[in-house]
Image (cartoon, grey):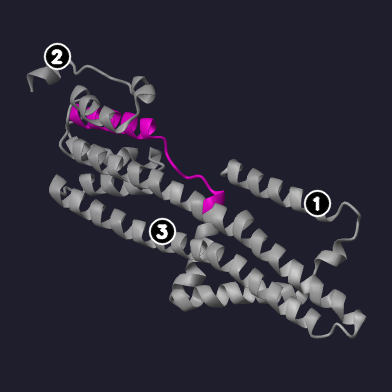
Amino acid sequence: MDFATILGLLGGVTVVVFAIGEDGNFAQFINVQGFIIVLGGTFASTMVKFPIQSFFKAIPIGLKAVVTNTKVSPVDLINQAIELSDTCRRDTRKLLAVEEHLKQIRDPFFKKGLQMCADGRDSSYIRDFLNAEMDLSITRQESSIKIFFSIAEAAPAFGMFGTLVGLIQMLSSLEDPTTVGKGLAVALLTTMYGVLVSYLFAQPIAEKLDQKLSADSENRVLVIECVCLVQQLKNPTEMYDILEAYLPENLRRSISKEEPSSDESKN
């Protein structure tokens, strides 16, 4: 669960509710025509830009990715890889011993790579396969990000369109004072709806997805290197020297660096 996103959304909604409900009259901020103009226009514009299948897939995928936090610590990944490689080096079954430890692996991408090690695939095949899967996953996530950015871009524009509609309605019926209020309400509320959809929901979600994609891509590059080193049965010291480059300075001391035994050093 990504508590920062949930707290941010709840905080934003709370501020809006407090601002519009201070006098207790929420009804004056509800306008069906304004909702239809902003939401309908925004979704229509976005569906023109993207295939309809991508649009309806991106919304639930994006929302799920924003509120969940499935990232595994890179330090944990490295420590698991070092421990697995050392275990396999000591076991007479070598890489076949990996299968016994797969249940302990949380990251599905890491688990898939280790399963390929146990299946006897060579490191070049594993690297090519995992790189291809990573590239396809990035492409899918980038599609979701683009869709949310498109929503963030279109919502204020349709809010402004609603404002123009409301002003036209108001100015065209100035002789009837009873219709002026309705036109002015549409003019102002559609702008508010557009701003809220864009800057409270769509754009923050797009930015969060972009940040998560960047972090996930870094993790996957690390996972690919970990899997290939496990497949090659590198000793812990070698793995530490190679993998510490993937960590910032403040996290490098968190890796458990183990010296190989005297028996191993002879191999």
Left or right: 200 in relation to 142: right
Q: Residues within 10 Å of mark 2 (few under 14, many from 20)?
A: few
Q: Nearer the viewer, mark 1 or mark 2?
A: 1
**Which stretch appears magenta?**
65-90
Left or right: 17 in relation to 84: right
User: Which of 106 and 219 lies nearest the eye of the viewer?
Assistant: 219
User: Which of 55 and 69 lies nearest the eye of the viewer?
Assistant: 55
Do tag 3 and tag 2 residues touch (Cβ < 8 Å)? Answer: no
On the image, numbered disc 2 is attached to which residue? 262
On the image, numbered disc 1 is attached to which residue? 19
Picture coordinates of residue 178, whole percent (x, y):
92, 80
Amino acid under disc 1: Ala
Q: Nearer the viewer, mark 1 or mark 3?
A: 1
Picture coordinates of residue 195, whole percent (x, y):
65, 60
Mark 1 vs 3, N-terminal side? 1
Mark 3 vs 2, N-terminal side? 3
- C-alpha distance separating marks 3 and 2: 47 Å
Amino acid under disc 3: Gln
- C-alpha distance separating marks 1 and 3: 35 Å
- Is the C terminus in the top left, top right, bottom left or bottom right quadrant? top left
Say what secondary structure mark 2 lies in.
helix
Left or right: 36 in relation to 258: right
Residue shown at 19% from the left, 18% from the top: 260
On the image, numbered disc 3 is attached to which residue? 141
Q: Quadrant of residue 118?
A: top left
Residue shown at 86% from the left, 74% from the top: 181
